[in-house]
Image (cartoon, grey):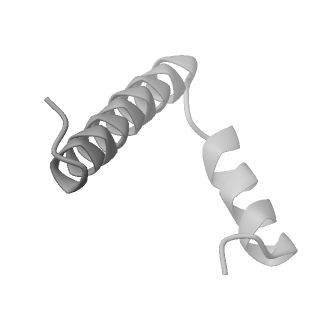
Amino acid sequence: SKNEPEYLEGRVRELGKLSEKELRGLAERGKEKKEEVALAKERELKEKYWVA
């Protein structure tokens, strides 16, 4: 599971090795993915309830 201490500690070590530029790139991709998911959920709800 992604919420277990062993996984989280390993992930922190991985991220700690990255440069500032790489971290900013990851953050930007994460923000874009979050927006895509939100738009997809919104479309799904509108289709489900027949809202324009």
Residue 18, how many percent across, how many down? Answer: 56, 36
Residue 51, how many percent across, how many down? Answer: 19, 36
Residue 44, how many percent across, how many down? Answer: 23, 51
In this picture, is 2 found above or below 37?
Answer: below
Which residue shows up at 72% across the image and 53% down it? 13
Residue 33, how many percent across, how many down? Answer: 34, 38
In this picture, is 47 found above or below 34?
Answer: below
In this picture, is 10 found above or below 41?
Answer: below
Relative to 45, 31 lies left or right: right
Which residue shows up at 53% across the image and 28% down it? 23
Question: Who is closer to the viewer here, 36 or 29?
Answer: 36
Relative to 27, 41 lies left or right: left
Which residue shows up at 30% across the image and 39% down it? 42
Count of numbered marks: 0
Question: Who is closer to the viewer here, 13 or 36?
Answer: 36
The N terminus: image quadrant = bottom right
Question: Who is closer to the viewer here, 17 or 28?
Answer: 28
The C terminus: image quadrant = top left
Q: Residue furthest front?
A: 50
Q: Quadrant of residue 38?
A: top left
